[in-house]
Amino acid sequence: MWKWLHPYAKAERAYQLCNTLLPYFVVVSVLCIVVGWVWGLAYAPADYQQKDSYRIIFIHVPSAILSMGAYSSMAIAAIIALVWQLRNAELAVIAIAPVGAAMTAIALITGSAWGKPMWGAWWVWDARLTSELILLFLYLGVLSLFHAFEDKKAGGKAACILAIVGVVNLPIIHFSVEWWNTLHQGGAITKFDTSAIDPSMLWPLLINILGFAALVGMLTLIRLKNEIIQVEKHRPWVRQLVSRG
Amino acid sequence: MQFESFSDFIAMGGYGFYVWLSFGSCAVIILGLLFGSLYEGKQLKQQVKSQMAREERIKKAKEMEAQV
Amino acid sequence: MQVSNSYWTLFCSVYKKDVTLAFRQRAEIVNPLLFFLIVITLFPLAIGPEPGLLARMAPGIIWVAALLSTMLGLDKIFRDDYMDGSLEQLIASPYPLPLAVLAKVAAHWTTAGLPMVVMAPVFSMLMNLESQALGATILTLLIGTPLLSFIGAIGAGLTVGLQKGGILMSLLVLPLYIPVLIFATSAIDTSIMSLAYSGQLAILGAMLAVALVAAPIAISSALRVSVS
């Protein structure tokens, strides 16, 4: 595997890989999100309890899942960056962080827009909302730490360390907040067969989750390409690329 | 189709404001990030290009000097 | 000299140096305590002086004040050594950096955390905290403040090389303090209801044990990044 992976440590190869992968992510995310949104908004049946307000679930749940997924992939990239000293993994950490922060922000906004009609308040200090808010703080911490450094190389390393510290703490924070207060409805799709949610609603939700996952991948790839160019801007291959395109 | 008419679809059974607020802000954030990133990339490439042009000019100026 | 012996000497000398420095400039010890006191004074003024209300809010207020006042000293924990270059010497020395870091964190706790534990009875009196909760307050502060020093030192290590590290450090560190806050205040709350609070203390102790092992490593790698 190392033999196969090793060439991608070179920035140029990584850039080319981004370019080859990008179209697939674009197609999957656009297709799934368009289908998922239209299906979710117009064709899925209304919930008997929450009526049409439940349709927020089609973006709330995917963005919440992806906010945590993006954090764990950021932490994995950070571990790779620190252990094997791969510059590209460091860049990936910096590329994922804003995307994850955006997902977290979406989860928070949609959560409070859903909470207003359901709980009667924009913001409830419930366990999941609170840990999502803390997750947003962690993302913003990684980003602002990176941008505070003049030397981007040191900034990238520092951001990696903070991401790892955060991922160690995240379960503790999540568990403690959960234990501190729980008002939120439990997870609805923990198991497929005993799912608490009707298939007519589950399918658009799954499609949306897939679409959001591809979207996160797509945005990360776009940002990663930028970061690679930023770092390698004095290299001949970047110059060739620029003068060609 | 769950809704009788387009205005029903917009109203979302009375929850229109919340539903459209969520979907709207979601779209705004995603599109903002997408176009921001694309613009940033374009800007970066432009920077590299102008840097190259600058070096070219300096090289030419030096050649002129050498000729004189 | 024996190796284990010299490790112990390193720990002691770093610890002694930091504590002595702090005691020379007494403001470093007194100011966080004064800050703690002032924050606690502000709360009754802001929310009203009813004893019942204050007693209900006391655990939270004491702990939030403790969080904020440990933040005050954190900025200095590596800054001076970074400025005069002795941090670089420590990194370059053949001794394990985590050990020196451990000594520095211990010194920070002795000068910032320990005085708060000692003064805790006074503060809980000011907040009308019920007497049966006093033991819990002291115990949670005793276990919790070293934890705060450890977590905070990670943030301090990451930001030591930056010009305006202070505010950024609080942004990085405060979210990580949340579990400590939750379990400590819940222990005090439980003790007010005269229930057993050993569970919360055990969790705090477990977190301290993890921090004792893992934090020095994280702090030293953060320092290596900042100094290089």
Image (cartoon, rainbow, N blue to C red):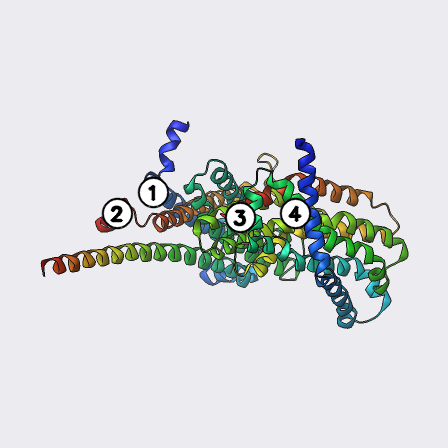
Between the residue at mark 2 and the residue at mark 3, the CA separation in whole angstroms equals 33 Å
- Depth check, front residue: B53 or A121: B53
Q: Which comes sooner in the sequence, label 2 or label 3?
A: 3
Q: What residue type is labelled 2?
A: Leu
Q: How far apart are marks 4 and 3 (CA)?
A: 15 Å
Question: Dot 1 lies on which element?
Answer: helix
State the residue position of label 3: A67
Q: Are marks 1 and 2 in contact (CB under 8 Å)?
A: yes
Whole-number angstrom distance, CA of label 2 to CA of label 4: 45 Å
Q: The disc numbered 1 marks a residue on which chain? A: A
Disc 1 target residue = A15
The chain that hosts pointer 4 is A
Looking at the rendered structure, the secondary structure element under dot 3 is helix
**Please, what is the three-letter code of the amino acid marked with disc 1?**
Tyr
Out of A204 and C220, give the one closest to the viewer: C220
Whole-percent x, y for residue A134 in the image:
61, 53
For this orientation, the residue located farthest to the front is: C1
Let me know if marks 3 and 1 both belong to one chain.
yes
Type of the residue with mark 3: Ser
- Disc 4: which residue: A173
- Tell me if mark 4 has few (under 14), some (14-19) or many (20+) residues whose alpha carbon lies within 10 angstroms of its own: many
> Residue tagged by mark 2?
A241
